[in-house]
C-alpha cells in the first residue's frame, strides 16, 4: 500500500509539474499577441514618446478606424481571404477524391502513383519556383487569382492525410452500401465522406493558414498593387506606415491579419480534437 501511495503521490507531482510547464509555455506564446493588441489600442503620439505596457490606458480605436478607411489595405485583406478560401475548397475537394481513390479503390499502379504523390512532401516550393514562374508567364496568368490559387492546390500532405483517413474507416460501411446497389460515387459522397469531417477540418485550417501566411509566391506573381495579398501589401507598405502613420496602426494591422485564423480555429476546434483523438487511437 505504501508503494502504491508513493506512486500516486509521484504521479500527482508529475502532473502538477506538467501543468505548470504547459501554463508557462502558453503564457510565453500569448504574451506577444497580448502585447500587440495593447499597442494597437494606444495612440501613435503616446507610442512615439514611450513604448510600454500600461493596463490603465489611455486607449483608443483610432488605429482601427484608420485601417477601415484604407481602401488599399481592405483590398489586400479581401484578396487574401478569397485566395485562402478558394485554396481550402480546392485542396479539400482534390485531396478527398484522391484519398478515396488511393485508400478504398483498387486500380493498376495505385501504389506507384501514391508513392509518386508522396514524393512531393520532400520537394520544397523554392526548388520549383523558376519552373512555376515560367509556366504562369507563358500562360499570361500572373497578376490573377488563378496564379495565386492554383499552385496551392498541389497538396501531397492533404492526399496522404485523407488516404490514411479513408483507409481507417470500417469496411462494413462500404459493403452495406454495395448490398443496397449504391454506386461508387454515392458511397464516397453519402457514406464515407461525412465520416472524414474531423480530418477535413484539420486539413482545411492547415491549408488556410499556409495560404493566408504565404509571402514567397505572391511576392513573385502579384506585381500590381491591386493584386497584393495582405502579407505582401503589409510588407511593401510597412516602412511608410512606421515612419508616417505610426506603430499603433502597424500593430492594428498585425491584429487584423491574425484575426481570421483565430476565428476559423475557434469555429472548428472540436473537429480538430476529434481528428487528433482518432489518430491517437489508430
Image (cartoon, grey):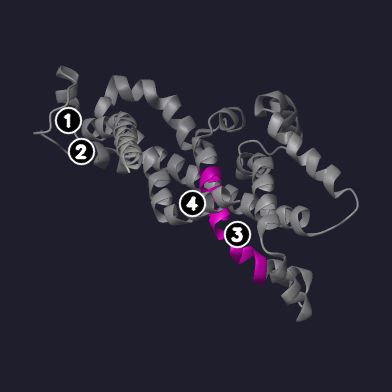
Question: Mark 3 Cα within 10 Å, few/some/many (few <14, many 20+)?
Answer: some
Classed neighbour count for the residue bearing mark 4: other residues with Cα under 10 Å, few (<14), some (14–19), many (≥20): some
- Residue linked to disc 1: 43
Q: Which residue appears farthest toward the front when viewing the image?
A: 1
* Percent coordinates x, y for residue 51 in the rendering: 19, 21
> Helix, strand or loop at disc 2?
helix
Name the mark nearer the viewer: 4 or 1. Answer: 4
Q: Is residue 268 left or right of residue 175?
A: left
Main secondary structure of the magenta stretch:
helix
Residue 149 falls in which quadrant of the image? top right
How much space separates mark 3 and mark 4, taking CA atoms? Answer: 11 Å
Q: Which residue is mark 4?
A: 272
- Tell me where residue 124 appears, x and y as whole percent: 67, 27
- Label 4, secondary structure: give it: helix
Q: Is residue 72 left or right of residue 251?
A: right
Assess whether mark 3 and mark 2 are in contact (beta carbons under 8 angstroms).
no
Q: CA–CA distance between discs 4 and 1? A: 38 Å
Question: Element under label 1?
Answer: loop
Quarter of the image with the N terminus in it = top left
Using the rendered view, name the quadrant where residue 58 is placed. top left
Span highlighted in magenta in the image: 190-208
Residue at x 78% of width, y 75% of height: 178
Q: Earlier in the sequence, mark 3 or mark 1?
A: 1
Residue 270: x and y in percent read 43, 56
From the viewer's perspective, is residue 228 above or below residue 113? Answer: above
Q: Which labelled disc corresponds to residue 162?
A: none
Query: Reading the chain from its start, which is encountered first: label 4 or label 2?
Result: 2
Report which residue position mark 3 lands on: 196
CB-based contact (under 8 Å), mark 4 and mark 1:
no
Residue on which the image places disc 2: 62
Amino acid at each position: 500500500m505504501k508503494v502504491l501511495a508513493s506512486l500516486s503521490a509521484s504521479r500527482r507531482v508529475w502532473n502538477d509539474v506538467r501543468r505548470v510547464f504547459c501554463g508557462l509555455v502558453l503564457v510565453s506564446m500569448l504574451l506577444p499577441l497580448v502585447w500587440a493588441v495593447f499597442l494597437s489600442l494606444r495612440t501613435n503620439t503616446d507610442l512615439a514618446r514611450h513604448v510600454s505596457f500600461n493596463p490603465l490606458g489611455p486607449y483608443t480605436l483610432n488605429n482601427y478606424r484608420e485601417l477601415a478607411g484604407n481602401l488599399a489595405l481592405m483590398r489586400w485583406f479581401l484578396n487574401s481571404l478569397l485566395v485562402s478560401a478558394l485554396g481550402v475548397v480546392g485542396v479539400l475537394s482534390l485531396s478527398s477524391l484522391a484519398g478515396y481513390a488511393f485508400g478504398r479503390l483498387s486500380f493498376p499502379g495505385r501504389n506507384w502513383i501514391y508513392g509518386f504523390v508522396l514524393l512531393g512532401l520532400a520537394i520544397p516550393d523554392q526548388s520549383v519556383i523558376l519552373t512555376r514562374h515560367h509556366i504562369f508567364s507563358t500562360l499570361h496568368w500572373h497578376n490573377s487569382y488563378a496564379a495565386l490559387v492554383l499552385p496551392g492546390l498541389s497538396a501531397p500532405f492533404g492526399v496522404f492525410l485523407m488516404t490514411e483517413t479513408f483507409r481507417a474507416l470500417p469496411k462494413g460501411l462500404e459493403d452495406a452500401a454495395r448490398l443496397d446497389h449504391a454506386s461508387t460515387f454515392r458511397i464516397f459522397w453519402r457514406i464515407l465522406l461525412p465520416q472524414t469531417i474531423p480530418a477535413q477540418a484539420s486539413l482545411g485550417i492547415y491549408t488556410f493558414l499556409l495560404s493566408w501566411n504565404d509571402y514567397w509566391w505572391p511576392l513573385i506573381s502579384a506585381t500590381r498593387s491591386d493584386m497584393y495579398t495582405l502579407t505582401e501589401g503589409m510588407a511593401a507598405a510597412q516602412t511608410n506606415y512606421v515612419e508616417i502613420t505610426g506603430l499603433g496602426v502597424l500593430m492594428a494591422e498585425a491584429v487584423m491579419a491574425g484575426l481570421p485564423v483565430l476565428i476559423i480555429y475557434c469555429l472548428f476546434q472540436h473537429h480538430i480534437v476529434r481528428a487528433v483523438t482518432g489518430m491517437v487511437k489508430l
